[in-house]
Image (cartoon, rainbow, N blue to C red):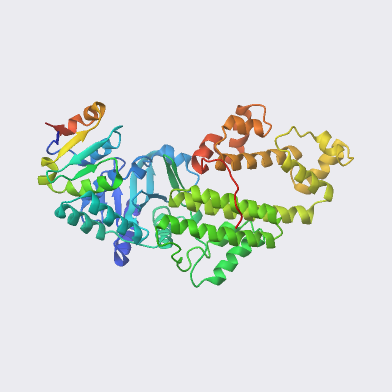
Amino acid sequence: MHIRKNVNIASFIKEVGQCRGEVSFQTNEGDILNLSSVLSRYIFATIAENPEILYTSRIVCELDADRKLLGSFLTD
Amino acid sequence: MKNISERVSLFRELLSCVNNIYLTEFDAGYNVISTSFPDQNLMALFLMCDTEIMNNPPSLDREAARIKNGPSIFTNEIGMSWMSEIVTEEGRVSRIYMIGPVFLDDYSVQDIERKIDSLISSISIKRSFMEILKKMAIIDLNRFYEYGIMFHFCITGEKIAVSDFDYPISGEDRKKDDFLAEKHGTYMAENEILKLVETGNLNYKKEMEKYVTIGTTGRLSEKNYIRHAKNIVIVFAALCTRAAIRGGLPSETAYQLREQYINSVERAGTLAKINETNFAMMGDFVQRVHKNKVLSESMSPQIRETCDYIGLHLNEKLEIRMLAARHGYTDYYFSNKFKHETGQSLCDYLNEQRIGKAREMLESTSMEVQDICNELGYNSQSYFGKIFRQAVGITPGQYRATYGTGGEKCISEKM
């Protein structure tokens, strides 16, 4: 799953805060940010300024419930 | 509202004169209205990233439940701190002002640099993030308080003290205030602070404000700022203990208090919790010294003995008849004598002592409220809750959530 273009990233981060399981942001360079960590979220916020990395990286949810919760922000 | 915006705008400019300290104005939905941070979008994202804030979003309910009037301070797990003030209009939150993020020491920044090396391999991401970090100020905690005091005045027109800062609760963490007593080069200030303990000066909070932001704290740990803050409290605990003993507090009581608070501060996980323990410790020492002085100077031996007896038997049913009989007095004479010497009826005194004990148990143990209620001789939890709320202003549960350290009280080795 990838982040859908032109979604509100602030709302996405806020919604990630509601997830029960692990939600990770995985870049093509192999970096993995666990978005339950505050530091990772801050790094992710910085990355969000760079569309090239933001939209080509993958979002991986550990739980189906979280995938549904974030559904409106994600695309295949 | 216009005046507030103008004042905030000026304050924002003043802040930018001396440091990279950013002031951002949000609406109630956390949309950025204006900010001095170079990237408005990023500021909005940063706020959302901060669990400490988002788990305790400013709201009217939280405002109503607050005990402290000053700005709220949030410190997250990577050592970034924010300060917030809320403006309400017609019963709604209309504006949220945030100062930050700032770092209160450079250990946190070094720690982030180390972590980011193991977390990210992409050089461009690393570089971008570190550039952002470098835009954030590293300032001394006391200076952060000073800005907060000015910030609050700017928004409300009220002058507040360091002890008025609010530390919202988050999960296992808890928030609150305030002071760091030891200052390099301010031996006089240290002596003055300890004199407040030694004399049992109940105006200590107000007096403290003269000294609390003087000078700078020394570096008492090379590990991190949490260890540094804990070490300050431990040193202060030892100094308070000596001051209290000089002030007449029985040494055993003073040592037990010291150990209790040192254990409590060792369990603390956040700066706010550490500072709260520090503040509570000083208050406890001052009040005990004061009480001891009052008891020994203004009471007859019989009433003083009765007060000691009550303190040791709070969990028992204490009737006037029994207490009077211990000294061979009639109920009527004893009641009048007690009230004359203590300024309180026996019933009020008992409730005050029991509520004081309840607060201590809620703060430092994990006992159930029902068990505390039983322990203190109350027949029903609802009555206990009512009395507690009347005395303290919040329910026992709310009190524990705000001040509780969660662990069993334990007293171990002496220094």
Q: Name which residue lies at 58% across and 55% down.
A: B282
Q: Name which residue lies at 32% across and 62% down.
A: B15
Q: Could you say where residue B77 lies in the image, as x and y percent from the top left?
A: 36, 48
Q: Could you say where residue B390 lies in the image, as x and y percent from the top left?
A: 61, 37
Q: Vertical placement of B415 versus B218: above or below?
A: above
Q: Could you say where residue B74 lies in the image, as x and y percent from the top left?
A: 38, 49
Q: Vertical placement of B142 versus A13: above or below?
A: below
Q: Quadrant of residue A10?
A: top left
Q: Name which residue lies at 88% across and 37% down.
A: B330
Instruction: Decide which of B328, A24 is in the foreground and name it.
Output: A24
Instruction: Decide which of B339, B311 is in the foreground and name it.
Output: B311
Instruction: Decide which of B337, B314 is in the foreground and name it.
Output: B314
Q: Could you say where residue B353 lies in the image, as x and y percent from the top left?
A: 68, 42
Q: Is residue B179 visible?
A: no
Q: Is residue B201 visible?
A: yes
Hey, which residue is sitting farthest front in the picture? B413
Q: Answer with left or right where residue B130 lies relative to residue B340.
A: left
* Quarter occupied by the C terminus of chain B: bottom right
* Total numbered circles: 0
Q: Answer with left or right where residue B316 lies relative to residue B81.
A: right
